[in-house]
Amino acid sequence: MSARQRPLSPHLQVYKPQLTSVLSITHRGTGLFLSLGALVLCYWLLALAAGPDSYANAQAVIGSWPGQLLLFGWVAALYYHLANGIRHLFWDAGYGLELKTTYASGFAVVAVSIVLTVATWIIAALRMGGGA
């Protein structure tokens, strides 16, 4: 018995990237990135519980420029994942599935996540006396 020649599912290399596909892939990536952020949050909480020396070490790591860059990324990922998740809830309810609306909501997700990320960091900087 010979194997049937079945058509293969098109790969990402076949399709031209579209806003909807890029946002979908980004949603999955931000979910993974947020999982890593949860591990850092656990590290910070354990350091807090372990005492002043451990907490000072954790603050030094998180307060360094690579730590701040990661925090910025986690905040951006959180807002993006939240906004895009709300978008998906509307889709699940059958709203916003028209092509024009899909693109408008996609651009809105990106804009909202950028605005909320920048606003969060500005508010944090103001509350911390100007330092990030």
Image: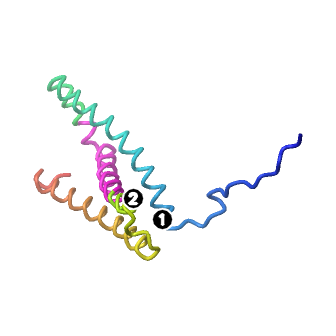
**Residue pushed farthest right?**
1
Nearest the camera: 45 or 124?
Answer: 45
Label 1 vs 2, first from the N-terminus: 1
Crowdedness near tag 2: few (<14), some (14–19) or many (≥20) residues, C-alpha within 10 Å: few
Badge 1 is on which residue? 20
* Residue drawn 21% across the image and 26% down it: 54
- In this picture, residue 22 sits left or right of residue 80: right
Q: How is the image coloured?
A: rainbow
Residue 23, percent from left and from top: 45, 61
Judge whether residue 68 is colored magenta: yes
* Residue drawn 20% across the image and 52% down it: 132
Residue 46, percent from left and from top: 23, 27
Alpha carbon distance from label 1 to label 2:
15 Å
Residue range highlighted in magenta: 60-85
Looking at the rendered structure, the kind of residue marked 1 is Thr
**Residue pushed farthest top?**
50
Dots 1 and 2: beta carbons under 8 Å? no
Judge whether residue 131 is colored magenta: no
Asked where in the image residue 27 lies, by quadrant, the reply is bottom left
In the displayed structure, would residue 32 be above or below residue 49? below
Q: Main secondary structure of the magenta part?
A: helix
Asked where in the image residue 115 lies, by quadrant, the reply is bottom left
Residue 60, percent from left and from top: 24, 36
Looking at the rendered structure, the kind of residue marked 2 is Asp
Check disc 2 and report its element: helix, strand or loop. helix
Badge 2 is on which residue? 92
Residue 108, percent from left and from top: 34, 69
* Residue drawn 37% across the image and 39% down it: 36
* Residue drawn 84% across the image and 44% down it: 3
